[in-house]
Amino acid sequence: MLAKAKAKYIRISARKARLVIDLLKGKTVEDANFILDNIGRKASSPIKKALNSAFANVNCERKDKFLSKDVFISGIRADGGPMLKRYRAATMGRATPVRHRTAHIYVELDKVTAGKKGSGSK
């Protein structure tokens, strides 16, 4: 693992974020950025932010600089964060809970070697 980054308390459900994350596993950073630019999902922008932060950590912590095609996503996941709980008025004087879900996104990057293909599937 070269570097990692996390984005916490993102205002999207982890289940919806996982739909985008499943497309990115094992891809190079260059391919993942292309996918995130062209997908029409709300979760793509915070995931892209975390991915670019992890890639910046790769080049910041090392003396040798890497290109985005030389680094692939070795691990990426979205876990559920705390829920914001609100109440909404319902019929007959009752109140129903509304749960605004949040997610934590974790990204780990590694360099592409001869044995590992960055653009392969899971």
Image (tube, grey):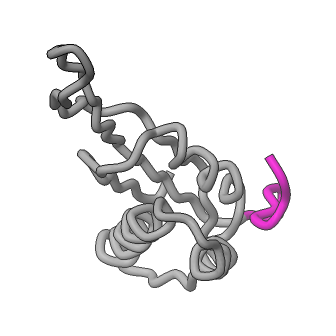
Please tell me whether the stretch drawn in magenta is mainly helix, strand or loop: loop
Residue 19 appears at what percent x and percent y?
Answer: 63, 48
The answer to which quarter of the image holds residue 98 is top left
Q: Nearer the viewer, residue 79 or 72?
A: 79
26 in the magenta segment = no
Q: Nearer the viewer, residue 89 or 77?
A: 89
Residue 38 appears at what percent x and percent y?
Answer: 65, 80
On the picture, is 75 further left or further right than 54?
A: right
Q: Which residues are magenta?
A: 113-122
In the picture shown, does residue 82 fall above or below 37? above
On the picture, is 101 further left or further right than 37?
A: left
Residue 45 appears at what percent x and percent y?
Answer: 43, 70
The answer to which quarter of the image holds residue 67 is bottom right
Residue 97 appears at what percent x and percent y?
Answer: 24, 22
User: In percent of the image, x 52 and y 81: which residue is there?
Assistant: 66
User: In percent of the image, x 47 and y 41: which residue is there?
Assistant: 78
